[in-house]
Amino acid sequence: MAHKEILTDTIKAGVPLIVKVQKALVAGEDTVELNGVTHSIVANKADKNDKSALSVADGQSQLIFVQTLTDKLTAAGKKVSAVAEEEGLDQIKGLLPEAESNTRVIVDPIDGTSNFLKKHRSNTEEAVDGKGWGTMIAIQERQPDESWKTVSSAIYESSEKDTPEQLTGRLFIAEEGKQTTVTKMDSGAETPLNTQAIDTTAKHVIGGFIEKAARAQMDVTMKEMVSKELDLSCVAQSALAVATGKAQAYYQEHPNLHDVAAIANIAEQSGAFVAVMPVLKPGKDGRPTDKIQDGKDRYPIVVAKNPELGMKLTAEYAKAKGYDLATTKFRRGDFTEVSFAELAQPRGLDTVSATVENLRETKQVAKG
């Protein structure tokens, strides 16, 4: 079974439960019945230090997503492990420890839970409103050097017209070597997404949390090229706004692996610029680390419609963090490691200097 079919079936299996819970929430209910069991809609994180929002839909839908992926990929001969936002992976049948797997699924069941709990159900199809939520899934395969490469991914973008019986939002899917496609779930109509072919007039940039020194450097570029800065609480919606031409760029310093794996792949396969920075370890000062690690570390990311803008923002962020651009390894949208110069090459830019000549000489960028 092709990954596109696996991802589509997985979305269809889990998202209706999310919609059912939100429908009960909109109706003013405090509880919802799922599989014959009554649950409180608002839940508490297992980690008491984690104050982020959580609903019963997060955990229950995650079980469906991960179990469906595990079953289908195992049937295809894969040895499957998982990285997911919520607890409960020990309940998944057939799931293996990462060390024993050759395929890894990464799941964020509800990106934008705070929007979900506020009863928002909108998307970026008409405007960038910051009120949506989405589901993000990435499938990665272990490489000979023990690194992980994203080979397919999916993002479901919520719609105000969704019902448990009929999803009406948009499903974005990227497969290795293929252009991102967008499917309208009610009609089944599928179209390719080519970011570079979209005439973007809006000069919006969507910014997540970023450390002050890095932001001060990036302001140099943004003041020249940006007319409005937005702040969206849904990572998927933010990246899709760039991929679909509603914004020029998106950046964030502290996303987790489950926040970026799908969006990085979807955006890059649509033709957008993507740079995933060297990992920042939680609790540290954000200085460069010698080894890129997965798990709960942070994955700073820049997504830009315009490759030149993406390279400039990446260079400015790297300068503030003290990276040596001549030696630092970055990651592309599929999570393969590349040099700073190689970030530009797939997008038709021949040299690093071509992308930063209006900023400063390449050596000056690297040395600071």
Image (cartoon, helix red, strand yellow):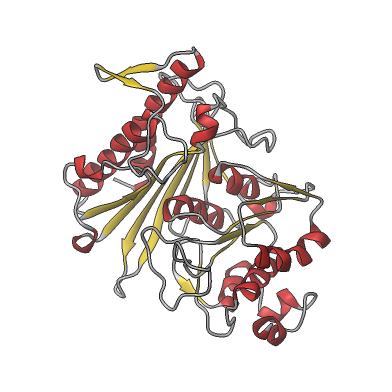
Q: Is residue 310 visible?
A: no
Q: Position of residue 329 (x, y in %)?
A: 50, 76
Give whichever of 216, 62 is nearer the camera. Answer: 216
Q: Residue furthest front?
A: 49
Report the label total: 0
Residue found 60% across the figure and 78% down from its top: 322
Report x, y in % for residue 120. 57, 27
Q: Which quarter of the figure has residue 64?
A: top left
Q: Residue at x 39, y 58 (%)?
A: 296
Q: Position of residue 47 (x, y in %)?
A: 35, 44
17 to the left or right of 360: left
Figure quadrant of the C terminus: bottom right
In the rendered structure, the answer to whether residue 347 lies left or right of residue 5 reads right
Task: Examine the rendered structure and indicate whether residue 345 appears above or below residue 364.
Answer: above
Q: Pick whichever, 208 or 225, lies toward us.
A: 208
- Image height of 138 relative to 145, above or below: above
Give left or right: position of 4 versus 354. Answer: left
Task: State whether residue 206 is above or below residue 302.
Answer: above
Classify residue 12 by image quadrant.
top left
Question: Which residue is at 27% across, 38% downward?
Answer: 68
- Expressed as whole percent of the image width and height from the top left, the position of residue 337 reads 46, 72
Q: Residue furthest left?
A: 94
**Can residue 107 be seen by looking at this rendering?**
yes
Reply above or below: 326 against 14: below
**Which one is in front, 368 or 313?**
368
Closer to us: 261 or 216: 216
Q: Quadrant of the N terminus?
A: top left
